[in-house]
Image (cartoon, rainbow, N blue to C red):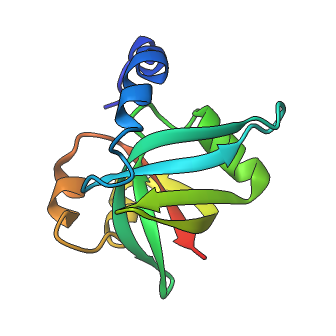
Amino acid sequence: MQLPQWLARFNRHVTNPIQRLWAGWAPTMGILEHVGRRSGKPYRTPLTVFSARIDGHDGVAILLTYGPDRDWLKNLTAAGGGTMSRYGKSFRVTDPQVMSKADAASSVTGLTRWLFAVLPFESAVLLRRG
């Protein structure tokens, strides 16, 4: 399942500014700070984020609720990474790897692993912490 693009546009302009107030603190939420690949403008995108272990390194998994054709993912890929804020702390994320949710599921750790498994989305991105 992939959410409709009109909802992505609505969330970008209406929901995201509100979510930025708490997303860096709330469980399963985070704020991805990235730079526009053409504009150079800084962006802060609230996302649903899950803890992960990627090739022996700490990281995060993000379900691609609107599919892989997202500006934040293109920006992150072009820049080689960005900064994630979770639970009031910020850390660098690098090496974006887009894959199916089924392939990403084995990397997800922690108490919310079950939630990652049951959400009805098809693809995810893994980001290595560092």
- x 41%, y 44%: residue: 47
Residue 9, x across and y down, in percent: 48, 16
Residue 13, x across and y down, in percent: 48, 17
* Residue 3, quarter of the rendered image: top left
* Residue 75 in the image: above or below residue 130: above
* Between 121 and 47, the one nearer to me in the picture: 47
Q: In this view, which residue lies farthest toward the bottom?
A: 56
* Residue 69 in the image: above or below residue 15: below
Residue 41, x across and y down, in percent: 76, 35
- x 42%, y 52%: residue: 62
- x 44%, y 41%: residue: 46
Q: Is residue 78 left or right of residue 76?
A: right
Q: Is residue 114 left or right of residue 96?
A: left
* Residue 112 in the image: above or below residue 42: below
* Between 123 and 39, the one nearer to me in the picture: 39
Residue 63, x across and y down, in percent: 38, 47
Q: Quadrant of the C terminus?
A: bottom right
- x 40%, y 60%: residue: 86
> How many discs mark residues in the rendered view?
0
